[in-house]
Image (cartoon, rainbow, N blue to C red):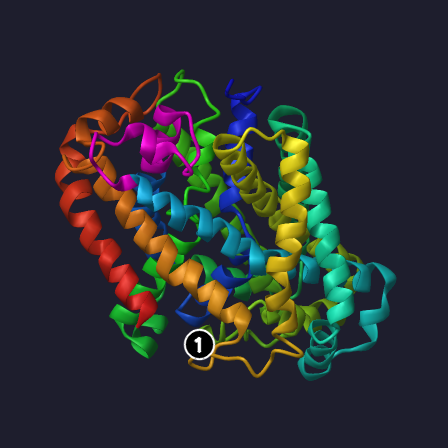
Amino acid sequence: MNREKFSSRLGFILISAGCAIGLGNVYRFPIMTGSYGGALFVLIYIGFLLLMGLPIMTMELSVGRASQRSIASSFDTLEKPGQKWHWLKYMGIAGNYLLMMFYTTISAWMVIYFFKYAGGSIMQYKTAEELGNVFGSVVNNSGLLIGVNVLVILLCFGVCSLGLQNGVEKITKGMMIALFALMLGLAIYACTLNNAAEGLKFYLIPNLDGVREHGLWTVISAAMGQSFFTLSVGIGSVAIFGSYISKDRSLSGEALTIMSLDTLVALMSGLIIFPACFTYNNGVTADASAVGASFLFTTLSSIFNAMPGGRVVGALFFVFMIFAAFSTVIAVFENIVSFWLELTKMKRGRIALINIVLLFVLSLPCILGFTVWSDFQIAGKSIMDLEDFTVSNIMLPLGSLFYVFFCTSRYGWGWDSYFAEVNTGKGMKLAKWLRPYLAYVLPVILMVVFLVSVL
């Protein structure tokens, strides 16, 4: 099988960043930042990105580039005779499907809300309570959600069916450039609001209020968790793009660029949300104990509906949200297509058709979990919450831990192989003195992340 390649480095950077950039950057990051004290939380968050996210991303990219395969067969290619690392393919494949089982539904919410703002029907509702009822009517309308969800799946698999360069690369590049332009415009507008200075002071100038209120360990663990989950590493969704690039550039620099773009989106979302919250919501953002996508449709929507030009701002904001969501969906769908290309002899178009039907069926439990299956709960979690928890709190940290062991242990691919691959090409190099940290300290941090996120 001839491996497809990106037509440009920019395509690789933007598509890989698009996979990492998701809805959590936009609503979860500002909520966590608002709850845990603002700028100090942001600094700790960035520190953990460098300590955890960056090295794990280099490992995923290295495994992908060295094997020229997705997670469906990358471990088979690189493991030594007699080793069982290829069993990890099943968790990776399952993780990508499970992520899309609920992520396509959330993406459908964004599409619905764009039309609500574009048409102006939502502007008559002003309070968070009224908007909460509107959101409830959306999630309880199974027919509408199924229809829009099918549209999301069709569009995104349609992009993947066109091929890597003509479909995934070309369209995702356009979406990502538009996403950054929209964010910049919205951030500039938000910074002109009446109390924007107070919001920016809270967001950009460190203070100890969050530490005094919640305790240092709580703030640190929250920043550690957010920094880890934002990059979506551990289930091979980033490794696939390593398999599509040449060996011209070292992977540490590429990973740093991808992580920087992901972080930029999170930081810019704060430049939009905090000035708006301090102007129209008395400085209240949200409670981190109740982090959820509904923040967008209640608190944030009430702010849009109160500000001058809120209909236009709301519509543009949800266009931006659609681009953020679709960039992730297309990236993961490309991963799924790659699984099938490697494991079968089918063509892209046929694989896309099969998976359109498959994802339609697999997404039904999440949608129906708000209506006819709403009584089905485990430990108080709905179907969507269970799917999200399994991916975010179990599969991502465990998968990342396995990648670290595979790349640094002599019982896996091994340090020498990983070190040679990550440093192949021009650009920033991984220092050899980091080996003790990557091999012994990072696994401990990941185990702490796993225990904290589960317990």
Residue drawn 45% across and 57% down? 204
Asked whether residue 59 is drawn in magenta, I would say yes
Side of 176 where 377 appears, left or right: left
Mark 1 secondary-structure assignment: helix
Q: Quadrant of residue 61?
A: top left
Where does the image place residue 306, in percent across and percent down from the top left? 74, 72
Q: How many marks?
A: 1
Q: Which residue lies under the disc numbered 1?
A: 289
326 relative to 392, above or below:
above
Residue drawn 61% across and 71% down? 294
Side of 2 where 217 appears, left or right: left
140 relative to 361, above or below:
below
Residue drawn 63% across and 56% down? 104
Q: Quadrant of residue 395?
A: bottom left
Side of 229 where 196 appears, left or right: right
| Closer to us: 227 or 360 | 360
Residue drawn 53% across and 75% down? 382
**Neighbours of disc 1 within 10 Å: few (<14), some (14-19), many (20+):** few
| Closer to us: 299 or 247 | 247
Quick check: can you spot residue 103? yes
Q: Quadrant of residue 452?
A: bottom left
| Closer to us: 226 or 372 | 372
Q: Amino acid at mark 1?
A: Ser
182 relative to 434, above or below:
below
Side of 215 where 107 appears, left or right: right
> Could you tell me which quadrant the C terminus lies in?
bottom left
Where does the image place residue 34, in percent across and percent down from the top left? 47, 68
Where does the image place residue 178, in percent across and percent down from the top left? 68, 40
Where does the image place residue 59, in percent across and percent down from the top left? 31, 36
| Closer to us: 126 or 242 | 242
- Magenta span: 58-85
Quick check: can you spot residue 187? no
